[in-house]
Amino acid sequence: MNNVTVIPIPAFQDNYIWLMRNQRYAAVVDPGDAAPVLAYLRREKLELTAILNTHHHADHVGGNAGLLREFRVPVYGPRNESIPDLSYRLSEGDHVSVPSLGLEFDVLDIPGHTSGHIAYYGANLLFCGDTLFACGCGKLFEGTAQQMYASLQKLSSLPDATLVYCGHEYTLANIRFAKAADPANAALLKLETNVRKLRELDMPTLPSYIGLEKTTNPFLRCNNPEIVRAATRAAGKTLTDPVAVFAAIREWKNNFKI
Ligand code: ZN
Ligand code: FE
């Protein structure tokens, strides 16, 4: 990946601002806060060359203005959401080029958490904001279960090795719920052991990768008989299609007390 590394910059309670960098240049995804990004850029003597936003929530775009005061860079974001300072309004089929890092991304429409939410996919990296989380998925603030299910299916069809950079450190809490929905899943129990170790060391549990999500994330496993059974129990009625299963486990998780 031509010397590009991806660095998590923690922000607020549990956000990650993802910063891609080489020796001289950087680009950030979802800078909810400018201050920690500016501190990192200064310390590492890097020049910011692009800002990528996945959706309009303040914890993902709140730092745009502060970064633009220091660096005049293009801001990429979803066509159908209102975000201040956007230079390029994107939707599925569009491409983003970050020449300073030698990177190209395809834009994917992944509505559900918000109605215009997009993802950036390229160079084996996926920046998916608050749509797909490690072992979980975003809440349906603006979209329908049908939309979110289709968005998650789209992401799960990417190659298994694709690295998944999510917007929040929610993995451990997500696993607690996933175990209730999928108690006999050995891959999930193994993941829990690994994630616990990382969190005890205060280390990020991200990125994940698509192959791991397909074996551990209940929201990508709506056809699995275990999940269907658990969802049916939670909903108290027979669920016949995967969207109904998805809607039932999303609703169940909304009310799940850890
Ligand atoms: Zn959000
Ligand atoms: Fe968020």
Image (cartoon, grey):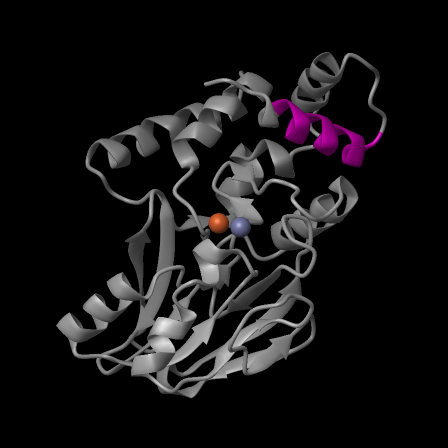
Residue 48 shows in this picture:
no
- In this orientation, which residue lies closer to the viewer: 233 or 252? 252
What main secondary structure does the magenta stretch of the protein show? helix
Q: Residue 83, located in which quarter of the rendered image?
A: bottom right
Residue at 63%, 39% in the rendered image: 220
- Quarter of the figure with the N terminus: bottom left
Task: Give the x, y percent position of residue 144.
Answer: 76, 44
Q: Residue 39, located in which quarter of the rendered image?
A: bottom left
Residue at 62%, 49% in the rendered image: 156
Residues in magenta? 241-252
Above or below: residue 160 compared with residue 22: above
- In this orientation, which residue lies closer to the viewer: 235 or 142? 142
Residue 61 appears left or right of 156: left
Residue 110 shows in this picture:
yes
- In this orientation, which residue lies closer to the viewer: 34 or 250? 34
Task: Give the x, y percent position of residue 160.
Answer: 53, 52
- Quarter of the figure with the C terminus: top left
- Asked if the magenta segment contains residue 38, the reply would be no
Task: Give the x, y percent position of residue 57.
Answer: 53, 56
Residue at 51%, 77% in the rendered image: 85
- Asked if the magenta segment contains residue 250, the reply would be yes
Above or below: residue 7 compared with residue 73: above
Above or below: residue 58 compared with residue 184: below
Residue at 39%, 31% in the rendered image: 172
Task: Give the x, y percent position of residue 41.
Answer: 22, 73
As drawn, the residue found furthest toward the left would be: 43
Q: How many marks?
A: 0
